[in-house]
Image (cartoon, grey):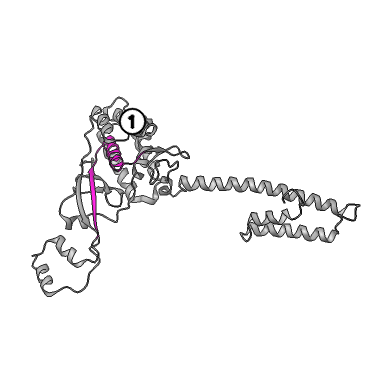
Amino acid sequence: MTDIKGISEPLYFYYRINTVTKMETFILRGKPITDDLEEMYYCFPSDIEMPLGTIFSIIGGVTENILLSISMEDTLKRNEEYLEKFEQIENIELSLQAFLLCASLNADYSDINSKENIAIYNLNRFISECVANYNYATNDYLEKVILANSIPFPKFDRIIVDYSYLKRKGEYSDEDMKNFLDNKMPFQKQWSEWVDGLNIEKYEYYSVDTVSGFLATLLKVIFDNRKVINICENCCCYFVPLKRSDEKYCVTNKYAGEQDCKMAVRIEKQRNRLSLKQSHIDKMERSVRSMLYYRVNSALPRNQISQKEYGKICEEIHSYKKRIEEGLCSIEEYELFLKKFFKRKYK
């Protein structure tokens, strides 16, 4: 729970992980979470969920800004500019903005000697060690670090919620309707009897109020799910691999409306291959043009071709290049065409 000056009502911030789908979100609430399922159904707007580890990647940029800031105002400005990039997850971005404002009012993150600032620094050092050696990526080592920095070990409230209640099963029986109207059926039983293919989702809600506590919570969930942390070889940011532990590139940038690093690197490699290929093709084309030009002007009748034949071949070359630009022809097809003019080299 956090109070902000000028706001009469307290704010509650929760990190939520779906233990079934492994999707996560960050939520700002005006009320604490509750076991009242009916209230829980209507308490959130449409929450945006992302794969496990995405929020950790985003918070990595936040903690970096905190450790580099020279004042509380600088901290908030740096992180506001950083988080505004994530337009694809506007709800989460706004919740994180409010969270950082609240956290900064309770702790001056620009004070390098504060316990909170030191705790963030030490957690970042711990993450570095986890990247260098996966053996450290466990809750046992995490507990050792956070206890040394006076951070409570993260605990959750598990809530089971069915979000399929809007799908009606069919006609209600007279007895069911009467029980419903008389409030004689438990809330969960009512929905379970009237919903086709009831889809129960299990969520863990972690209450957070400090950046160090939030970071510790994210690490705990990552380690709970036996995930590791890597550094993206393209953007040099921390990320949690979605499938293989040896993944080299993150996909976090796509939530900022940019091309994710995995796709960006793939396209760059393809562009480089095409560039090398194109360089090779250009060399072949120059050789063909030079060879044909020589044959036009050759004094030897055996190799000679007419100016008209030369012009026709040049038109074909131009046609191939134009069709490649329009996507109607591949470079490989053009290469096969050029190879026809070489008797030995490409046979």
User: On the rendered structure, is 255 left or right of 214?
Assistant: right
* Residue 81 relative to residue 96: left or right: right
Q: Nearer the viewer, residue 214 or 186?
A: 186
The quarter in which the N terminus is drawn is: top left
The residue to which callout 1 is attached is: 126
> Does residue 26 appear to the left or right of 245 in the view shown?
left
Q: Is residue 323 left or right of residue 51?
A: right
Does the magenta segment cover residue 204?
Answer: yes
| Amino acid found under the numbered disc labelled 1 | Phe
Q: Position of residue 134 (x, y in %)?
A: 36, 34
Image coordinates of residue 222 in percent, x first then y, are 31, 41
Q: Residues within 10 Å of mark 1 (few under 14, many from 20)?
A: some
| Residue sitting nearer the eye, 268 or 210 | 268
Name above or below for residue 183 compared with residue 32: below
Q: Nearer the viewer, residue 20 or 31?
A: 20
Q: Residue at x 11, y 61 (%)?
A: 186
- Give me the residue at 67% from left, 46% from top: 279
Q: Quadrant of residue 322?
A: bottom right
Assign a secondary structure to mark 1: helix
User: Over which residues does the magenta segment extend?
Assistant: 199-228
